[in-house]
Each structure stands twice: as structure tokens, then as C-alpha cells.
Image (cartoon, rainbow, N blue to C red):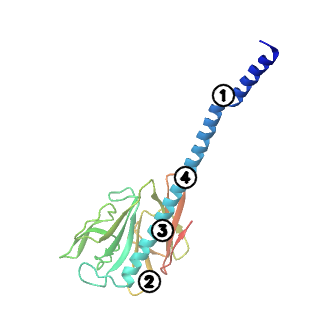
Amino acid sequence: MNFFSKNKIIASALKNKKGGFTLIELLVVLVIFVVLTGVVLVNQNSFNNSELLNNFTYDVALTLKQAQTYAVNVQENVFGSFSSSYGVFFNIGSSAGGSNTNFILFNNLVSSDGNVTYDATVDMINNKGSDQGDVTNCPTTNSECVQKYAMTNGLYISNICVTNSNNLINCDVKQLSILFTRPNPSAYIYDLDNSPPTLENSATITLSSAKGATSSVVITGTGQIYVQK
């Protein structure tokens, strides 16, 4: 084999080598692809959790607004009357009927005795309520329940704070009732942990995600409802 033939073989080998990928190069590309995919998935998951929390926070605010609208616009109740209040009830305590993933839009039918708590069961003849404060129960008949809301995907109500007339803040509230009564859009905010229930100036309901993100709904005694991030 002459000198030129040897050079042609070497050149051909080098050319073939440049045209392919080594195992190490393939592994590097694969690692980069896996890392980039992981980053995208993590960011996508965080975005989805944030959007779910944001959407459900507005759902709480809209539910409060719905109760306010029902009361002011005189929604007829199951008794055929237009005088009862509408409200939203929260019970995040550990007692029976409590849940930090449920809340109730209700029609306060049993109010003659000053009752401002949600009654899951109502005695329609004697106008008396029972199963008070059970946010996990929403019977379709003989009940104050208009609609039960359930939070999913790791979302929950993490905290309820109220502010009284002296601007003192209590963030250890477990049961809260927010009522609206015609003809005014004002909100009657009751801390039901006290006996009798105490009327507060405002309330802040904080929602959290499993990732630790938070968002809040604020309701004032004048009837203002807004989302606070």
C-alpha cells in the first residue's frame, strides 16, 4: 500500500468519525433534555397550583357576593317568604361537622330566636333548626343549605381573622357566619366561637395551597368584598 492510499484511508476514517455521535455525547444531550423537561414540568405545576388557588379565592368572593345579591334582590325562600337573610358559613374547626375544605351558602330560615348559624336540618312546622354548623352536610330538603362548596387539589381554608370595633384582630376564629339582610348590602359578620356570637367589623378568610401559597378574601361590615393577594 503506497503513501497516498494510507492517507486516503486515514482521511476516510476521520470523516466517518466526525459524522457520528459518541456515547458520551448522547448521554450529555439526554441529561440536558431531562433537566430542561424537569424545569418545565415544575414551573408548569407551580403555575397550575397558583391558578387553582387564585380561581377558588375568587369563587369564595363570588359566593359572598351571591349571598349579598340574593338578600338585597329579595330571593324567595322555601317558605314562600322574602324576608329571610342569606349568608355564607365557615367552620374550619375539628369538631363534628367542621371542615377546612367546605363552606356553605345558606338561607337563614331559623332566625326568630337570633340564630345566625347554618342549620343543616330545619323543622318546617316548628321553625327550629338542628345540625348546626355542619358544613359537610347539605340536604336538598328541609335545610337552610342553598349550596355546598368543596375545595379540591390540596386547597384549604387555613385561617380566619376578624377585626372588632376597637380594631383588635383575632386570627383564631373557627366558625364564622356572614349574613346579608334586605334592604341594605351591609354585611353582618359573626364570630360564632363566642357565646353569644359577637358582631365584628370585618373578616379575612385566607386560603392556602399544598405548596404553601396563600390568597385571601376580605369582607367589611359595609358590604365590600375583595380579594387580597
Residue depicted at x 60% and y 40%: 33
Residue type (three-letter) at the residue carrying disc 2: Pro
Front-lying residue, 21 or 13: 13
Judging by the rendered image, the residue that carries numbered circle 2 is: 185
Residue type (three-letter) at the residue carrying disc 1: Thr
Question: Which mark's residue is nearer the viewer, 2 or 3?
Answer: 3
Question: Which mark's residue is nearer the viewer, 2 or 4?
Answer: 4
Judging by the rendered image, the residue that carries numbered circle 3 is: 58
Judging by the rendered image, the residue that carries numbered circle 4 is: 44
Residue type (three-letter) at the residue carrying disc 3: Tyr
The residues bearing labels 2 and 4 have C-alpha atoms spaced at a distance of 40 Å
Residues at marks 4 and 1 touching, judged by CB atoms closer than 8 Å = no
Residue 2 placement (x, y as % from top left): 80, 13
In the figure, residue 198 lies in which quadrant?
A: bottom left
Neighbor class of circle 1 (other Cα within 10 Å; few <14, some 14-19, many 20+) is: few
Q: Mark number for residue 183? A: none
Residues at marks 2 and 3 touching, judged by CB atoms closer than 8 Å = no
The image shows residue 177, relative to residue 45, as above or below, that is: below
Residue 60 placement (x, y as % from top left): 44, 68
Neighbor class of circle 2 (other Cα within 10 Å; few <14, some 14-19, many 20+) is: many
Query: Which quarter of the rendering shows the C terminus?
Result: bottom right
Mark toward the start of the polypeptide (1 vs 2): 1
Is label 3 in a helix, a strand or a loop?
A: helix
Is label 2 in a helix, a strand or a loop?
A: loop
